[in-house]
Image (tube, rainbow, N blue to C red):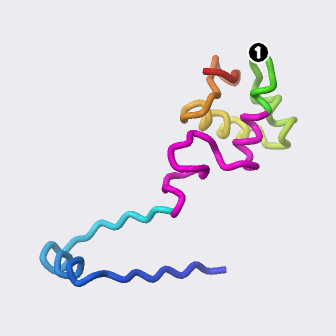
Amino acid sequence: MTAKLTIALSDEVLDALKANKTLTIRIETARGGGSGGGSAGSGEPRAGSLPARLIDWAKSRKGTFGTSEITKKFKLSRAHASMLLSRLASGPYPIQRKRRGVYAYGG
């Protein structure tokens, strides 16, 4: 399936383009843009997504968990689990990196 994009520019935009010879366009989604999903600014991933399921699973645990537990629980490769945990730990999510390969839930 191919995506089709139609852009309609006003006369003012075309005049600015002719005058400046450059135009910057930023494409955003209807839900607020940015990667991820969820509501704009909510700090939560889209419900049912892998990041959301991982956060829910981590919330119910006490203590720390490792990359190896994520690979087994969610049937992911080590690299995928490591990337996912790293992304969650560096973002606005309640997953914290304790040390290499060890993470915990909480703020």
Q: x, y percentage for residue 19? A: 12, 77
* Viewer-proximal residue among 105 and 90: 105
Give above or below for 86 relative to 18. Answer: above
4 above or below 66?
Answer: below
Mark 1, secondary structure of its residue: loop
Q: Residue at x 77, y 22 (%)?
A: 65
| 15 on left or right of 90 | left
Magenta stretch encompasses residue 33: yes
- What stretch of residues is rendered in magenta? 30-56
Question: Pointer 1: residues within 10 angstroms few (<14), some, or many (20+)?
Answer: few
Circle 1 sits on which residue?
63
User: Where is the N terminus found, in terms of image quarters?
Assistant: bottom right
Report the residue at 22% width, 71% height from top.
Answer: 22
Query: 28 or 96: nearer the eye?
Result: 28
Q: Nearer the viewer, residue 73 or 28?
A: 28
From the viewer's perspective, tell me whether residue 103 is left or right of residue 3: right
Q: Which amino acid type is marked by label 1?
A: Gly
Residue 3 coordinates in the image, percent (x, y): 58, 78
Query: Who's the residue at 57% across and 39% down the image?
Result: 43
What is the tally of numbered marks visible in this picture?
A: 1
Which image quarter is the C terminus in? top right
Quadrant of the rendered structure where residue 31 is?
A: bottom right
Percent coordinates x, y for residue 47 in the rendering: 71, 48
Q: Is residue 103 visible?
A: no
Where is 59 relative to 82, above or below? above
Percent position (x, y) of residue 45? 64, 45
Q: Is residue 65 left or right of residue 32?
A: right
Visible residue check, residue 60: yes
Residue 89, quarter of the rendered image? top right
Residue at left offset 60%, top offset 52%: 37
